[in-house]
Each structure stands twice: as structure tokens, then as C-alpha cells.
Amino acid sequence: MSKFRGVTSIGIGNAYQGARATIDLRPKPTKLANGARFRSRQFVAFLLLWLFVVHYFERWQVSSMIKSCRWKNWENWPSGADPHHLVVVGDPQLVDDFSYPTRNRILLYLTQRLSDNYLHRNHRLYHQILSPDTTLFVGDLFDGGREWANPVWYAEYSRFHKVFDPVESTRTLAQIPGNHDIGFGNGVDIAVLNRFRTFFGNPNDYLVLGNHTLVLLDTISLSSTEHPEVNKDPTEFLAALSQDDHPAKQYPRILVSHVPLYRFTESQTCGPLRESKKRFPVMRGKQYQTVIEYELSQRILNSIKPKVIFSGDDHDYCHIRHPLANTGAVRSVAGEAFTDEITVKSSAMTGGINRPAIQLLSLYNPLDGVADPDFVVDETGSLVVAHDTLRSRLCYLPDPYQGLRWYGFVILLMIASYVMVYMYPESTRRLNSRLRDRLGVIKPLYEDDLVKRQSMKLSLMDFLLDWNVPERRNWRLCVMHVTASIAIYVCILNRYHHSI
């Protein structure tokens, strides 16, 4: 066998003595106007890699995780049931100037763009895949909502509805305020509270969904002891609910409160699905309190007697069980002997947890029969919290930073390849030669077809490597290729962010 530059000549056995096969396998890079050569195959190889990685993390991975939460996989209702489906969204807390006051404008802008895209992309996909009847937010829609004057707040309100744009045939309930929206207790400003409920709706209300009563209670304003104008509405609303003949008592109740109710953390642990290994915090500070006061919590529980409570604020998952006092219940049934409380995980990538999530709720309460005659009360800590007329499941969202790490890795790999070719041409030629010899081995289609084997081998290496190495260093071409590639990558990612 003999090799010449640009030509491969192979003698094949006695039958082919004197025969020569000439194959020109050199890459033909495109010439630019200034005489430089555009490394088209190297560019295309990394472009395809970038498209694959972006599509995987921006679409496929999200869809795959949400599909695993499809209702039919876990709700287990009788054949022919038509349950009401809700998605419960915890603490989106849109990033604003209040979130990171020490960050420069560029870094803050990038944080806002990425976090908004994470929320919006997931919002669109879980509605497309799960098609819920209702979407329920449990407060802290904004991060600095309580701090902003009206012009800034109005802009943030519009931004919220761009991130969580309305979905046809799905009802959105977002009137429960969080402490980041209006403050807490005695720190609530009546003007801020009125602004929130004017735009989002009455935070003290009830409605019937799937033959269940969803009770919305502004426990933050209810906790105010110094401002009657703040606590008046929730106090009167709770007093009315304590009456046995209240219309809300016609169906099993589900309570929604931004701040969790009081618990004894030594005995009421959150279960294995909580990320933090520390006990649930019971503390207070400026404009926040991690739990509602004990006496008020007991009044809420025994006035409403809910089967389940959904709360937010903490950002991490927590499932506990509250005993109900003086009910006379003889059965261990939710809403009679006890109430389950699920503190919903944050749905945001900036929530300080590794695995954001949404909470799914399926309601089925037939009035002419029993929804689940074989129902047995489970212990707390299960992925699916089950009762006779409702089911709730924790549904994880993708790791928000895994995709960013892969994007960075692909960009660094692309930069390294161009730097290798343009700044270290001698080393690149040696590496190119070794890779051609060691990595380009392809099994021939026919054992004696050495010409075809060599052709396939060199063609594959030329396509994968495309290292038509320049004679000398050229940092200008290196910068040009890297800059053009990054610009196109950013445009592709931006297109994914705006195409859903």
C-alpha cells in the first residue's frame, strides 16, 4: 500500500496487480470574500450538536417528564369517571429588581429571561399535555410586588400574564396573595392589598369544582391584628364558613392558603419527598412568617374542616396531617377526623430547590354513589396522596440548570475545537493523523473490497473532523468562527424561547 498527498493508491492481490484506485477525499471548504476559508463541515457538525441539545432540554425532556404524570397513570378512578383536573402552581415569584439588588443590569436581565422562559415553557407544555380544567396559584406571584409603586407594578402584572398566558378551556385562579405580593399580617398595606384583589380577584371566596368546594382564604390578611380594614373581609368570611348550614359545606372542602398552618415539627414531619433534611422552619421576620399562629390555625381547621389544604410559601414539599378536634368522628376520614396539608413545591428555577414541581389534583365525587368504595387511608409521604373523592400527585419539572450546563459545555467544546485548529496547527495535524488511523476503522462491506473500505474510512474522518489545518496561526479567523457560531446559537435558543 502506498499513500500520496490527496491520492490513495492501493494494490489489491494478484488479480489487481498494477491496478490503481484514485480517490480525492480532501474537504473543500467554502471561500469567503476576503480569501479566508469557511470551515463548513466543522460548523455544521457543531450546529447539529447544538440543535440536538437545545431541542432535548427545551422540548423533549420537559414533555417526557410531564407525560409521566398523565392523569390516567395514577388517579385510578372507576371506568367512565369524568373527574375535574387541577394544576396547582406554587410560588412563581417573578424575578425583578427586588430579587437581586446587587446584580448588574446585564446579569439581572439574563436571570429574568431564563427564569421567565422556564416558567412559561413548562406552563405551555403541561397545559398541552395534561389539559387541566383549572390552574390554581397559591400566592407569591411576584417577588417585590409589595414594594412597587403602581407604574412598576402594572408592568410586572403584564409580564405575569405573558409568562402565564391564558390557555383556552382552562380556568385560572390566581387571587390568593403571598407575602411577597402584599406583605404579612400587620405589615399589609390596605392600598397594596386593594390593588392586588382589584386585578386578581377576591382572595376570600369559594367555588364548586368537581362536586368539591374550593375555599380560598387570605390567611395573610387574616393574621393582621392591628388593622381592621385589612382583616375585616377574611374574618367575616371565616365566621360565615363556621356555620354548619353554609352552602360551602354541601361538598367536601379543599382549602387554599399561601402560608402553611401551624404544625409541631417534632411529630409532624414532612415526609421523604422533601428535599431539605432539616425540620420545617417555624419562624418569623420582616414581612414574613413561615406558619400561621397556632390558635388561628385551629380556628381555620375546625371552622372549614377541609379534606386537604394546599399551601405554598416554603418552596419545598411537605405533607403532614392535622387532627380535627371536637368532630365526634368515628371514622378515620379526611375532613372528619383529620386534614391533610400539602405544601406545594415552587415551580420556579429561582426557588432555591433542586427539583421544581407542580402539584396535580384530581376530583371525582359522584352524587349517586361512592367514588372509591375500596378506599383505605394511606400514611403520609406517598407520591400520590389519595382520599375517597380526590387524588393529588407531585409532578416534577426538569432540573433548570442541567440544560444550562450542557449549553455551556457545547459552546466550550466548539471554542476549543476552533482554538485547536487555528492556534495550534502543528498539534492539530498530529492529532488528526492519529485519529484517522485509530478511530476511522469501518468494517468493509466485502472482505476483499479494500478500496471501498479505505474510501469510507477517510470520508468519515473528513466529515467528522474536517481539519483542513492552516499552515500558520490565525487568531482573526478563530475569533470570526467562534463569534459567528455563538451568534447563531443564541438566535436558535431565542427562537425556542419564543416559539412556544
Image (cartoon, rainbow, N blue to C red):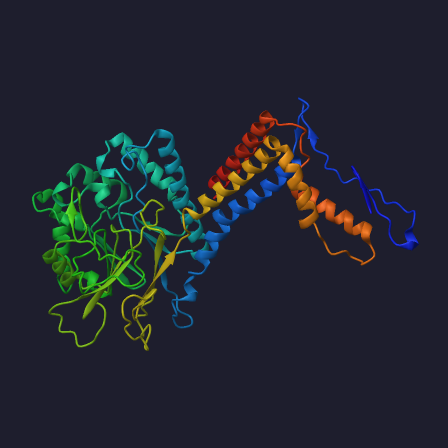
Instruction: Tell me: residue 481, above or below residue 60.
Output: above
Q: Quadrant of residue 305?
A: bottom left
Which of these two is toward me, 258 or 362? Answer: 258
Residue 15: give x, y in percent of width and height.
92, 54
**Side of 90 relative to 1 (left or right):** left
Which residue does the image show at 65% across and 27% down from the upper left?
Answer: 472
**Side of 120 relative to 310 (left or right):** right
Which of these two is toward me, 216 or 121? Answer: 121
**Side of 116 relative to 270 (left or right):** right
Which residue is at the far left?
226
**Side of 125 relative to 191 (left or right):** right
Q: How many marks?
A: 0
Which residue does the image show at 32% across and 61% down from the upper left?
Answer: 273
Instruction: Tell me: residue 202, above or below residue 330.
Output: above
Instruction: Tell me: residue 111, above or below residue 137.
Output: above
Q: Quadrant of residue 382?
A: bottom left
Query: Can residue 197 be seen by looking at this rendering?
Result: no
Which of these two is toward me, 178 or 479? Answer: 479
Residue 410: give x, y in percent of width and height.
52, 42
Residue 441: give x, y in percent of width and height.
71, 52
Query: Can residue 334 be seen by looking at this rendering?
Result: yes
Residue 153: give x, y in percent of width and height.
27, 34
